[in-house]
Structures are given as structure tokens and as C-alpha cells.
Amino acid sequence: MLDPAAPQLVVNSRTLYFSWLPADPDAVAAMVPPGLCPRPDRQVFLNQYVVDDETQTSGFGAYSLTYLGVSLLGVDAPGGLNPGGWWTHYVASSRRVREYAAARGAPVLAGRTKIEANGEGLLSETEIDGTPLIRARCHVGETGHVISSGHHRYFTRRDGQLLSSVYPFVAEPVAPFEIESVEFLQPSHPLYALRPANPLTIGFGYYSPRSSFAYPGGLSVHAVAAPEPAHLVHQVPASLARSGLPSGS
């Protein structure tokens, strides 16, 4: 088993990363634990990627992975361009990767991801126990000279504590790029709660045949404000309580 405190590097993975507005915003919001606040639009994100060869990693070997989660309010990644995210599902083909991620609090599942490009068409699919659960179809172009780089911030929970970690990335996205469809194929599976609304509303996204990133060496405990004593708690006006607006993170 890899030391979960050790950093890990992945280079040149084939990566499809995008977000959407969900069909069931209340179900999505219910997945976010106390101490974190979902965005008002309840945006859901999905990252599907494939590492084709063991030489592309510092210790993971070749594997495929899909993670999903809920975008958060008030806990952006460094630079403020990317919102923090709460991982709800983490589907990896490699036991080594699952064990490493589980020790960091990730909600791991065993499964496989495939990404197949055919000309200007791209098909991605995530399966568990041989059953396809998520399928996306995209229109893709060629990589150019544009580089996308920055940081993502993801939250997990371990031993009753919320953990925060910042992941640097560098990607070479294709252009043009368009998500044509996103299907959640098994209504009986918990993943189905994250399905997109109809019509499909995409927030952000890219496909990159060469995307590199690092798992940082340390996790920081995310401090959650203690509740105020009962005699100091102020009453929220009923009009605000009904509005569904977040009160903060």
C-alpha cells in the first residue's frame, strides 16, 4: 500500500472534465456535509480520466478513474478561478489507487472508465461491476497552443473531520469542444441523484489528451465554526429561511 501522506504525480492522462446543473438540486445539496455549503445553483462536476501506462505516474501505475462531486461556495482553490468541491463518488480501476485515496477520506468504489476518440467524436463511459453508469458524448477538435493551468481544491471526510487538499494541474485542452449528451444509465444506483437537468446546462468543461496533476503530500483539516450558544442564536426571518439562500460556509 502506498503511503497516503506521500505526494503522487500523474502526467499526460486523457481527461474529460466538466460540470452541469442537476435535475434534483435538493438531492445534490443533501450530499454536502455540515461545514460546507453548495453553490446556489447546486452545480455538479465530473472528471473522467485514463492513465494508459505506468510510466505516466510516480507510483500509481496505469489506471482509470472517475470522480464526481458538488461545487462549493466560499472555499475556492488558490487564485479564485475554480470553486472548491466535495467528492461524492470516486470510482477507480486500481486497488492501489483506491487504498491511497480511501486513506485520504475519498468515497472510493471499484470500477472502470474508458475514453474513446473517433475523429471529431469522443465517447466516455464509467462502469461498476461491468454495468455502464455514466456515458458522455462530445464533439472535440485538436490541441493547440493554449495551456490551462491552476489548482483544484477538493474536500473529503475522515475520522469525523473535513479535510481539504489543493491539487495543481496543467492541461492542453482541445478546441473546439462541446458536450453533446450526458446519460446516467441506472436509476437504482446512488450516482443517479447527480444526473443533469433536461435541457442539459453545462457550466465549464474541457477535454485534454494530455493533462497532468499532482496529489499533494499533506491534507489540512478544514475548521468548522462551532455553533453559537443557544442564548446567542438569532432568529432567521421566515422569508429568508424559505428562500433557500446559503448562509455561509
Image (spheres, grey):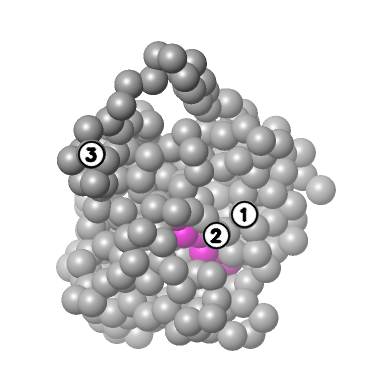
Count neighbours of disc 1 (C-alpha within 10 A) and say few if under 14, some if 14 to 19, many if 20 or more. some
Q: Which mark is residue 238?
A: 3
> In the image, what residue occupies the spot 23% across and 39% down?
238
Spot occupied by residue 45 in the image (x, y as percentages of width and height) = 37, 57
Q: Are marks 2 and 3 in contact (CB under 8 Å)?
A: no
User: Who's the residue at 62% across and 32% down the image?
Assistant: 161
The answer to whether residue 123 is visible is yes
Callout 1: helix, strand or loop? loop
* Lower position in the chain sequence, tag 3 or tag 1: 1
Query: What mark, if any, has residue 157 been given in the picture?
Result: none
Q: Residue under label 2, please give it.
A: 89
Tag 2: amino acid: His
At x 41% / y 61%, what residue is drawn? 27
**What amino acid is at disc 3?**
Ala
Find the magenta span and give its range: 64-69
- The amino acid type, in three-letter code, at marker 1 is Pro
Q: Which residue is identified by label 1?
A: 107
Q: CA distance from mark 2 to mark 3?
A: 35 Å
Specify which label sits upstream in the sequence, 1 or 2: 2
| Distance of label 1 from label 2 (alpha carbons) | 5 Å
Please give left or right for residue 187 compared with residue 90 in the image: left
Q: Nearer the viewer, residue 220 or 123?
A: 220
- Predominant secondary structure in magenta? strand
Q: Nearer the viewer, mark 3 or mark 1?
A: 3
Disc 1 to disc 2: CB gap under 8 Å: yes
